[in-house]
Amino acid sequence: MTRPVRVRQAVPADADRVAAVFLACWHRSYVDLLPASVQARYDAAGAVALWRRVLAAVPNHVLVADVSGDGVRGVVRFGADPDDARHGHVFSLYVDPDAQGLGLGRTLLHAAAGKLRAIGYATATLWVFAGNDAARAFYAAQGWTPDDGTRVEEAYGEPEVRLRRSLSEAEGTPG
C-alpha cells in the first residue's frame, strides 16, 4: 500500500464506513458462497444499525484500518471465544474488496492477535465458511489451522470450519 495505514480503535462515528465495508464484502466477496436470500439479510440501514450497536458496546474490541485519503477500508472485531472463554476469538474480519490484497487484512489480524495476547489469551479461534477458499488460504498463511470444529449456523445455512492459532507466535507473523 502506498498510502499510510493507521490501525486504530473503532469509534461510534465509524459506523457508516464500517457498515459500507461490511456490505461490500457481504455482497461482493460472498456472492458465490451464500444464497441470495442470505445475502439479502443485510441492507444499508440494517448494516449501519448493526455496527452502531457493536461500536457502542463497552468494551469495544473493534479495530479499523484507516487509509490516508481513503478512510476506513477494513475492520476486525475480536474478544472472548463464546464457546470457551479461555480462548480469544476473531468474530469478523472485513476488508473492502477494492482494497483486498494490499495487506490490510493481515495488518488487522496481526493487531487483533496482539490485543488478544495483551488481554491474556494464549490461543484464539475464528470461524470461516468451508467453501471460502480464498479466506482459508489467507488465514493459513497467517498461521491459522483447522481444529476439527465444524458448524452450520441456521442464519447462514452454510458449513463453517473453526480455525485456531497460538497467539505466542503472533509476534512473528510477517507484516
Image (cartoon, rainbow, N blue to C red):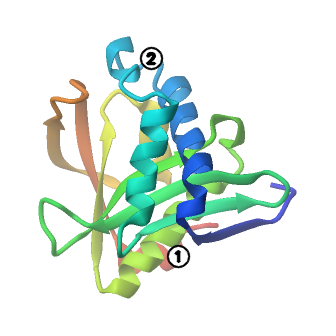
- Left or right of 125? Residue 74 is right
Q: Residue at x 36, y 67 (%)?
A: 57
Residue 127 vertical position relative to residue 104 in the rendered view, above or below: above
Q: Residue at x 50, y 46 (%)?
A: 138
Check the picture and name the quadrant holding the C terminus.
bottom right
Estimate the x, y position of residue 28 in percent, counting from the top left.
55, 24
- Left or right of 164? Residue 133 is right
Reading the image, the residue beneath label 1 is 172
Residue 140 seen in the current view: no
Residue 95 vertical position relative to residue 111 in the rendered view, above or below: above
Q: Residue furthest top?
A: 36
Sort mark 2 into few (<14), some (14-19) or many (20+) by Cα contacts within 10 Å.
few
Mark earlier in primary sequence (2, 1): 2
Camera-near label (2 vs 1) is 2
Spatial CA span between label 2 and label 1? 33 Å
In front here: 1 or 156? 156
Q: Secondary structure at mark 1?
A: helix
Estimate the x, y position of residue 74 in percent, counting from the top left.
60, 52
Q: Residue at x 38, y 55 (%)?
A: 53
Tag 2: amino acid: Asp
Q: Secondary structure at mark 2?
A: loop
Estimate the x, y position of residue 165 in percent, counting from the top left.
33, 64
Reading the image, the residue beneath label 2 is 32
- Left or right of 123? Residue 85 is left
Q: Residue at x 70, y 61 (%)?
A: 66
The disc at residue 39 is: none
Residue 95 vertical position relative to residue 46 in the rendered view, above or below: below
Tag 1: amino acid: Gly
Check the picture and name the quadrant holding the N terminus.
bottom right
In front here: 12 or 82? 12
Residue 16 seen in the current view: yes
